[in-house]
Every structure is written in structure tokens, then in C-alpha cells.
Amino acid sequence: MSIKSGYFKKHLHIDLTKGTAEHRNLSDAFIEKYIGGRGFGAKLVWDNLMRHDFKIDPLGPENLLAVAPGPLTGVYLPSSGKNSFVAISPATGLYGDSSMGGGFGIELRQAGIDILSITGRAPELSVLFIDNNKTTIFPMPELKGKSCLEAEGMIKERLGTHAIHVATIGIGGENMVRFACVNADWSRNAGRAGLGAIMGSKNLKAIVVRGHKDLPVYDVVGLMAEADKAFKYMEEHKYFKLWQQEGLMNVIEYANEKGILPAYNFKDSVFARHDQINGATMLDRYKIGDSACFSCPMCCGNICLVKSGKYTGTVVEGPEYETCAMLGPNLGIDNFAAILSATRLCDELGIDTISTGNIVGAVIEGYEKGILSLTDLDGREIAWGDEDAILELIQKIANRQGIGDILADGSRHIIKKWPEMDKVILQVKGLEQSAYDSRASISMGLAYATSDIGAHHTRAWTIAKEMEEGQNWTDDDKVDIVIYHQKLRPLFDMLGVCRLPWIELGLSERHYANFYKYVTGKETSLEELLELSNDIYDLTRLINARLGMSRKDDKLPYKVWANPPLTGPNAGKVIDREDFQKLLSLYYQKRGWDENGIPPAEVEKKFAD
Amino acid sequence: MSKKLTVIPEQCSGCRICELVCAIKHFGVNNPKKAAIRVLTTYPQPVVRMPIVCSQCKVPTCAQVCPVDALRWLDGVVQLDEENCISCYKCVEACPFGALYAHEDCDLPIKCDMCGGDPECVKKCPKGALRLIPEAALGESRRLNNVLSYTQMKEIEFYEKGEKKVIRYAEVGKEEL
């Protein structure tokens, strides 16, 4: 049974150097095999690498940036507002992707596009406007140096409408900060892997979309019935209201209790003043509204306002857990208003809060340890909890001023400049680590080490399960759960939906196979979709292997081996190098890759189409 | 019909499920741009997420501007006579709330028909931001909120059975209104 619906079968390719827009058709075989989202993106990136003989500068005009919603994006089912950005990452020099929620991807699909790809470089700062079937590229040099929000406002004014969706970069992206994000809908970001820097390198300030088309759905009645079951399950869940109220901020308390909350650049994994920066404090003193991505009943976004003190008037959508942890406890900040201010700053500048929090934390510790001198810091002292100095440093990074110019190039370059920084900065393959401390969870360590984009929890997040029920797990259990996550979580990114209903409220993943069936008309099973997702994992591994990555790069940050958390339930715990290597070998074996972590030659043939 | 569809913008999260279910119910397609209810979002100042839907006015501006008398208030709903409508879209332009919509695929203005008295959007809103209430109850929650946020309110703390509580009271005549 083949695909009957669910796609426009359209690929729009933009060459900014030539200023051309080309509509290409997608074949049924392509659609079935790659599904959408990161699947489409990875294949286009692979083909582009082949064209350039694997010699691609991530910030060169030859790098291809794919913007890819999935076949379920914008469809009536829980949390269908996701859209992936895919390219060779300026942070890692390897495969990179990041997804954003909100409404941008829906609008792109409603313009009749299943995937957008962009190469080249515009002669001056430009805007790409996809208006249903019409595509234009126009220069807007006046956007230079504008924040994401300012740019969005100016574009809406110029086009004379508010009924558009705008994905912009801030000054961080323009300055090619290697952890710059793409921002849309005020505070929705494709945050990781530095994809905003790619737009900056292409002189592309914004992608604007407007679409009116019906999204193709094979069986609307069947879809509605299935979706209503899923919505009902979620609404009856005991934690549903908590998610609506606190969103991801409820994780702060959990992470602190379990001893996995980064504090003082991961020196510790609990934070004494957690009650000052947790979900309850946010609700009590700062929250003024809910914010949801498209078709999501959980509305995990919080709109916060500072009503008193020096940050009065700061209004921001957020923070969520990662942002709060990385810009709060990880920098020794216990003032929620300051966290909100730092969040707003990062959103305006268009830089990733996770990487920023890591790098600023590493600078503070580096200075504390004497790795960085006061001269390195341009004569400005910085210390844990020093809000003013921290906010200043964030500005300097995005504007590439002083030390900010080096920090803006990310972990890899920081370590090249100051090799001792390797001991304080938490990163894998050049991507700074998410806000879950892996020292008490070896499966989480394996997840970070083998994630295709670097130390991010997007591919596998096994830490909660291991902390809760993993005491007697065998090595097989640990590897199996990581691989299962690495199949399922990327599948959500291929379908264009959010994984939170599944991971947080336990919505069965089987629903998604049914959603796919009702949308495309293709009979399938979850197992079949997971295999297709697994093929994409092989493909991204292959991309990375061909770019020179191997077992030596599947390692963990120095601290994870050497420096245990100082206090809390996991005080004293580190991951043993030998245990880890044993687990890694088992992981390769189960994946069918060789001892060096390289997929076999026949894998490559799969993607020759 | 004596019930009104009312919107509580403070409760709205902007998820647009109302748009989706409206379009699916009336057109059978997954297209939020064909809904008779739309969530308008503004940010960062002011932060508003407000679903905009027909108020079923008893003296409807849309009907007043209709050159062929195709819009009429009947039984609590401003009803569109599809046979007589000439699709001039004067009603869409005239509605003071912008609560009528147009779409290039559709021959007629898109207007809320209250789903025959049981609106789909009200049933599916996950935040309770859309409610169906008796006409006489309109404004009730606003009145209550207004009273509670009365600017002259003072607070005192007290203990009842060892538990700390707060009582609010209006201080009359101490400050100018």
C-alpha cells in the first residue's frame, strides 16, 4: 500500500547567489523512505555533501540549509507544531539539526511546501518571502543589527500584514556565532547546532511564509477519532494541569531532587536555592500567561513578566527547564528575574541558551581556576551569580567583542585557544551539553556520546528512567533503551510533531503510526516507521563518519570521567571510562557498526537513490 | 437559543485547536485558514492571545451593510442565507470585530453558525477559554474580577487554627477614588 495523501510532493529550492527559486517534485519513493522533517533534511544534506565531495564549510555558501516540517505538521492531533532545520553544523562541523515549535512550519506547509532548501549567499542582507505559490527574495539592509523581534516587526510593517510567520536571526546569527539560533513566533527557537549562523553566512535575515492551502489528509474522520482519543488521554492525565501551569519549569524541582540539575558549571548537581527559581516561584510571582505551539493542549510555554526590582518590565516567553537551569543554577544565579532577563537577551540576540549557559559557566570556572586571566576577560571580573557581568558577557558574545569573539566560535575553538578549557567545558563533538547531568546515569552518557548532533538530549533522554528503575539494568538494557529512544525520538522530528505528550504524559507512541496512516493513507506499523527512522540514524552517522568522525569522538566531557558532583544524592559519582567503552562497543555491535563506530559499506548503498 | 459563545482571552494559550476543529467540522478539511474563529496573537507588549469569533449581535453591522439582506439575526444566530449571498464581502469588511473571514477557495464569507447550538470549538478548547453560557450570565466573571481587583483593597494577615490566612477589605473614604 503506497502513499495516497499527506504531502504536496513539493520541494522548493532557493539559490541565494543566483536569486532563483526552483520547484522540484518529490517522488513517492522518496516520501515513503524519508517521511519528512529531519529525514528529508538529512537526505538533502547527504546529496549536497556528495556533490561537493564532502568538502563543505558550514559557513560557506555551499552548505545546504533545509527547513523541513513533516507530514503531520499542522494536522489535528496533539502538539503538531514542529518543524526541523537541518544542515552541516557550524558548531560541530558534522550533521546538525534542531526543531522549533510554534506555527512557522504549519504556515510553510500551507504554502504547499514539504521541504525548503537554501544554498548560496545573497549579495546583501535579504529576506525570503514564500507567499503561497509565489516566492520572492528582497534586500532589507535596514534589518542589520536588529533583534529577532525588531526584525519581525519591521518585516510585518513592510509587507503590510501581521498574518504571516517570520523566522529570523538576531545579531548572533548575523555575526555567525556558532551557536546562533533561528527564532520565530517571539520565542520559539531552532536553538541548537548553530543553524542561525548559517542564515547569517548566507546574508539571509529572515524567512517569511504565508500559506492558505488545505493540508492533505487522507481520512479526516478517522484522524479526528484517533486524535480525540489522544487528546482525551492527555487531558485526563494526573499531571496534565501541572504541565499547563508550569510547563517544563516543573522539571527544576525534579532535577534538583534527583541530583541531575547543573549548578556552577556542573561542579554540582543540586542547587541550594532551587526554590527561588522553580516552577512554583514562577507561578507565584512572574507568570502572566500560557503559550502553546500549534494544536497543543499542554501549552508548556510560560509568559513571564518581572513586576518589581531592577529588571522590571522584562517580558519573555519562557524560560523552560534547559534555559532556566543553564542561565540560572549553572551560573550560580538564584534570582529568577535575572534568569528572565538573560533569556530575553538571548532571544533578542538570537543565541542558544543551552550553549550560552555552558560557555559562560565555563568562563567563570576557567577564571576561577586561573585558566583564563583578567586580561583574557578584557579586564572585567566575572564570578558565580554576578548578574551584571554575566549579562554583559552574553552581549559581548553575540556582538563578538573582546573575548566574546573567541567564545562566539563555540567549544571547539575555545579549547583550541585555551587547551585547559577542555577540562571545564562540557561538550561532545563541539556541541555544549544539555542541562541533565549524566554522571549518575551511564545510559544518558551513552546518549550524549552517540547523539548525531553532539551533547544534546534530543535523540535519547534515558536519565529519568535509569534514575527511577535502572538499578538492576544490565548493559544490554542500557544500550537497548538508548537505541530505542534514538529510533523513536527522531521519528517525532521526521513526522513534524512534539515528543512531550509521549515522554512526559505517556501518550502511547502507537497513536503516531495511526496518525500517519490516516494522514497518508498508507498502511503501516510503528515498527516499520521506527525502522525508517533508524535508517536515518544510520544516514546521519554515515554523514559524520565521512566527515572524519569515529569512535574517538564518541566520548564524554572531561568532568564526567574526572570530577564528581560535590553534593546531593549523586555526590562522588562519575562514569568509569572502561565501563563506558564496554557499553560503547556493545552499542556499536547492536547497531551493526564496526568497532570504530563506522556503519558498513552496504548502508551507504541504501541512500544512493 | 439563549446561549452565547463567550471568549476568555486570559485563558487562551494560542494553540489554535479551535481553528482546526471549526474548519474540519464545516469544510471537512484540515485548514485553520478556513475557520470561522481565529486566534490573534500579539507580543511582546501587549501580550494577548484572543480568539475572534462572531458575537451574534442582535443589531448586526454585517447585516446592515449587506446589500441583498442575506444576513439575519434569527433565534440567537446571525444566519447567512447562502442562496442569496452575492459574495461581495462587505460584511467581512464591516464587522467591528473582524469576526467574519474570507478564503480564496470559498465562494462565501466564513461565518460562525454556532454549530447548531453545540459549538465544536467550545467542546475542544483545552483551556476553557471558550464557553457557552446563558445570555444573562454574560459579564459575570468580569464583574467578579473587577470587584476582586478593586484598587482600594487592603490586606491583613491573620491566623485561624494555626494556619496563616489573608483577608482583603476595602478601606472606605481614606483615599480619593
Image (tube, helix red, strand yellow):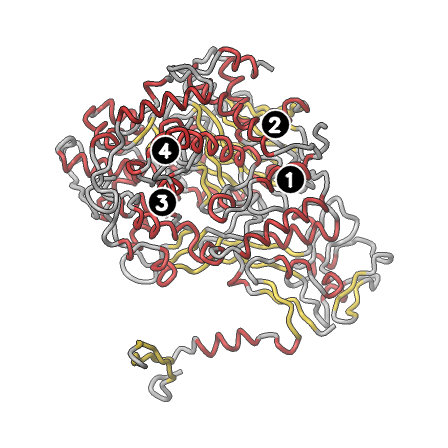
Mark 2 secondary-structure assignment: strand
Tell me which residue sits at (74%, 72%) in the image. B1
How far apart marks 2 and 3 lie (CA) works out to 33 Å
- Read off the chain for label 4: A
Does the CB distance between marks 4 and 1 fall below 8 Å? no
Q: Residues within 10 Å of mark 4 (few under 14, many from 20)?
A: many
Q: Which residue is identified by label 2?
A: A12
- Whichever of callouts 2 and 1 sits on the residue coming sooner in the sequence is 2
Residue under label 4: A443
N-terminal label among 2 and 4: 2
Label 2 close to label 3 by CB (< 8 Å):
no
Can residue A257 be seen here?
yes
Q: Chain of mark 3?
A: A
Tell me the CA gap for discs 2 and 4. Answer: 40 Å
Confirm whether residue A175 shows in the render: no
Q: Label 3: few (<14), some or many (≥20) within 10 Å? A: many
Few, some or many residues within 10 Å of mark 2 (<14, 14–19, 20+) = many
3 and 4 marks on the same chain:
yes
Residue linked to disc 3: A323
Residue situated in front as seen by the camera: A290 or A122: A290
Residue occupying image coordinates x 57% and y 55%: B40
Horizontally, residue B91 falls left or right of residue A199, namely right
**Do the dots labelled 4 and 1 sit on one chain?**
yes
Q: Earlier in the sequence, mark 4 or mark 1?
A: 4
